Amino acid sequence: MSVIVIPARMASTRLPGKPIRKIKGVPMILRVAEKCMKAGADRVIVATDAKEILEICEGLDGLESTMTADDIQSGTDRVARVAKFVNDDIIINVQGDEPFIDPALINALITDLKDNPEVMMNTAACEFSEGEDVKDPNSVKVVLDKNGFALYFSRLPIPYDRDGKGGVTYYKHIGIYGFRKSWLMQFAQMEVSDMENAEKLEQLRALENGVKIKVLKTDYKPVSVDTEEDLKKAEEIMGRND
C-alpha cells in the first residue's frame, strides 16, 4: 500500500499564501493534488497548517486532507506526522509547489520501493538543460555512484570541473521523496545533522546517518513556484497546455 502526502503551509517568505495562489483560476495546492491523484498511489493526503487550505482541499473528490501543527520545522517532518497514523508502507512526499509534477515519476518511485526492499529512501534528478545556471544555489545538485545512489547533494556545482575541460554532466535534484514508513519514522526523530545545517538540505541527514538514497533519473523538468515570477511562468505554461 502506498500514500502520497503533500505538505502545504501558508507561511512563505517569498510568496505569501503560496498554496492558495491561483494558476489559471485554480489554487496551486489543487493543481498539485490533481496531478498526484493521476498516479497509482492508494491515497493522496494534503497535510496543512491552515484552515483555508483544508477547506479548499475538501472540495476535491477523492482527496484527503488533515490539519497539522503550525510549528513543524520541515515538509518531511509534516509528512512524518501524517504517516504515523497510516498503515501504508510506502510514503511519497510531493512538494506543494510542484503543479506540473509528473504522475509517471511518482509511479516510478513507488515501483522502485516495491521492487527493491533494501531501498529505504529514494528521490529523482534530471540533467540540467542547456543555458541553465548550475551555479544557482536554489538549484540543488546531486552526484551519483555507479549504482544510482546519491554520494552527495549540494547547492554548489558538483562535481567541480577543476581543469575547466567541460563535458561534465550536472544533475538537478527534484524535490520528491519516497520513504519506507519505518525509515521515515526514524528520520523524523533524528537531530539536524552538520551537513544538513550547512547546506540547508534535509536529505543530507540520511546520508550522514549512513542511509543510502536511490536517485531515479528522469526527463521531467521541474517547475517549482516560489516567487511571483515563478507564478507568472506557471500561468504561461498552463495556458500553453490548455
Image (cartoon, grey):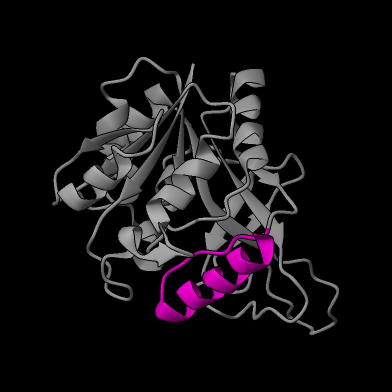
Query: Looking at the rendering, in which quadrant would you find the C terminus?
Result: bottom right
Q: Nearer the viewer, residue 118 or 26?
A: 26
Q: Nearer the viewer, residue 201 or 159?
A: 201
Quarter-of-image position of residue 132: bottom right
Quarter-of-image position of residue 10: bottom left
In the rendered image, the residue lying farthest to the bottom is 164
- Residue at screen point 26% across, 21% down: 85
Residue 122 placement (x, y as % from top left): 56, 38
Quarter-of-image position of residue 35: top right
- Is 225 included in the stretch rendered in magenta? yes
Residue 181 placement (x, y as % from top left): 40, 24
Residue 227 placement (x, y as % from top left): 41, 76
- Residue at screen point 72% across, 49% down: 218
Residue 142 lies left or right of residue 162; in this view the side is left
Q: Nearer the viewer, residue 177 or 167?
A: 177
Q: Is residue 103 above or below residue 221?
A: above
**Magenta region's main secondary structure?**
helix
- Residue at screen point 51% across, 64% down: 224
Tell me, yes or no, if residue 144 can be seen here: yes
Q: Is residue 166 above or below residue 37?
A: below
Residue 213 lies left or right of residue 183; in this view the side is right
- Is 7 included in the stretch rendered in magenta? no
Residue 72 placement (x, y as % from top left): 19, 48
Q: Which residues are magenta?
A: 221-242
The number of numbered discs placed on residues in the rendered structure image is 0
Q: Is residue 154 above or below residue 164?
A: above
Tell me, yes or no, if residue 137 can be seen here: no
